[in-house]
Amino acid sequence: MAEHTSSSITIEAAPADVMGVIADFARYPEWTGEVKEAEVLSSDGAGRAEKVRLLLDAGAIKDDHTLAYTWTGDNEVSWTLVKSQMLRSLDGSYLLKDLGADRTEVTYQLTVDVKIPMLGMIKRKAEKVIIDRALQGLKQRVESGA
């Protein structure tokens, strides 16, 4: 089984507000930094994205990839890689835990495998950087009310 990296952050907002930002793919380029374009290719009956194409520019890694999303209730979303130029796999999830008083703990889990050879230690470090940036960006976006 592949190793994954995970981290959590507390956001001063209700889980529904946090998930609203996570689910708004069209606005990812405004707050994620690495995502330059996001296009929802298909949605489920509830209007939630099922497949999303993302154009990523994370310095050394530039990629055009498609992810398939699975929504579990109102507080969890996970994704898997459908196609990519540089990645062999990209599996992740956001899990939201209601802490009450409009506070939410967000746990982001990520497993990345690139097509080029890379030491496991370097992969874990890259995953950690991606997760930390994403969580900080999400926190700032949600708490700013944008």
Image (cartoon, rainbow, N blue to C red):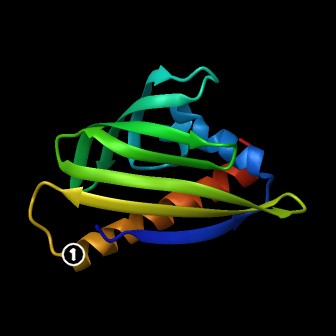
Q: Which type of secondary structure does the marked residue at label 1 adopt?
A: helix
Q: Is residue 52 left or right of residue 107?
A: left
Residue 144 appears anywhere in the view: no
Q: Residue at x 17, y 47 (%)?
A: 86
Residue 62 appears anywhere in the view: yes
Q: Quadrant of the C terminus?
A: top right
Q: Nearer the viewer, residue 138 or 22?
A: 22
- Crowd around label 1: few <14 · some 14–19 · many ≥20 (10 Å): few
Q: Nearer the viewer, residue 1 or 38?
A: 1
Q: Is residue 84 above or below residue 33?
A: above
Q: Nearer the viewer, residue 31 or 114?
A: 114
Q: Quadrant of residue 45?
A: top right
Q: Is residue 62 left or right of residue 70?
A: left
The residue that mark 1 highlights is: 120
Which residue sits furthest left? 117
Q: Is residue 17 above or below residue 41?
A: below
Q: Residue at x 58, y 29 (%)?
A: 48
Q: Residue at x 24, y 79 (%)?
A: 121
Q: Quadrant of residue 124?
A: bottom left
Q: How many marks?
A: 1
What amino acid type is highlighted by mark number 1?
Gly
Q: Nearer the viewer, residue 33 or 42?
A: 42
